[in-house]
Image (cartoon, rainbow, N blue to C red):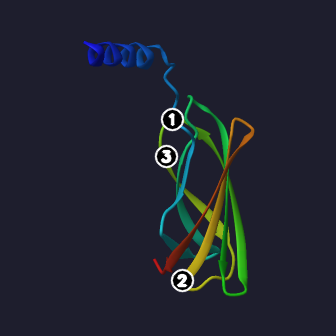
Amino acid sequence: MRAFRLFAAAIVVGISLPALADPPTLLIQQQATLDAVGVVVPVVVNCGDGASDALVVVMVRQGNETGEGVLPFASTGNRQVLNVQVVGAFAPGDAAATAELSCAGMPEGLVTGAFIKIVAP
């Protein structure tokens, strides 16, 4: 009987807690594509909480070469894959990338880094 009361209390507490929205998401995909002005880096973003204006900044470093790309976008409140153009004199091979996400004009505190592979088209 005591176990049943504890189970019932856990259910009531669980039901009474508010449902939280998905936290913002930022992920750099592992392959970037070389083009005429630099590289195109795909990133996965999700601002959550419905549509808003948003911004993603991606930085790439390969040896002594660095570049940055800024992409304003309309967040849908769902997962989106964006292609961010990063300008620089890059070559096929290994590189490092970082990204930052701002949603609805507020920095989300999300900064992520990844090793990427730059490939020719």
Q: Which residue is mark 2?
A: 94
Labels 2 and 3: the sequence-earlier one:
3
Give x and y (percent) for residue 16. 47, 13
Residue at x-position 32% and y-position 12%: 5
Q: Nearer the viewer, mark 3 or mark 1?
A: 1
Residue at x-position 60% and y-position 60%: 84
In this orientation, which residue lies closer to the viewer: 12 or 56? 12
Q: Residues within 10 Å of mark 1 (few under 14, many from 20)?
A: few
Residue at x-position 47% and y-position 69%: 30
The image quarter in which residue 40 lies: bottom right
Residue 108, disc: none
Q: Residues within 10 Å of mark 2 (few under 14, many from 20)?
A: some
Q: Residues within 10 Å of mark 3 (few under 14, many from 20)?
A: some
Q: Which residue is mark 3?
A: 80
Give x and y (percent) for residue 6. 35, 18
Disc 3 to disc 1, C-alpha distance? 14 Å
The image quarter in which residue 69 lies: bottom right
SS of the residue at dot 1?
loop
Please, is residue 40 above or below residue 118 in the view?
Answer: above
SS of the residue at dot 2?
strand
- Tally the numbered discs: 3
Give x and y (percent) for residue 109. 69, 48
The C terminus appears in which quarter of the rendering? bottom left
Residue at x-position 38% and y-position 19%: 10
- Amino acid of disc 1: Asp
Please, is residue 47 above or below residue 26 in the view?
Answer: above
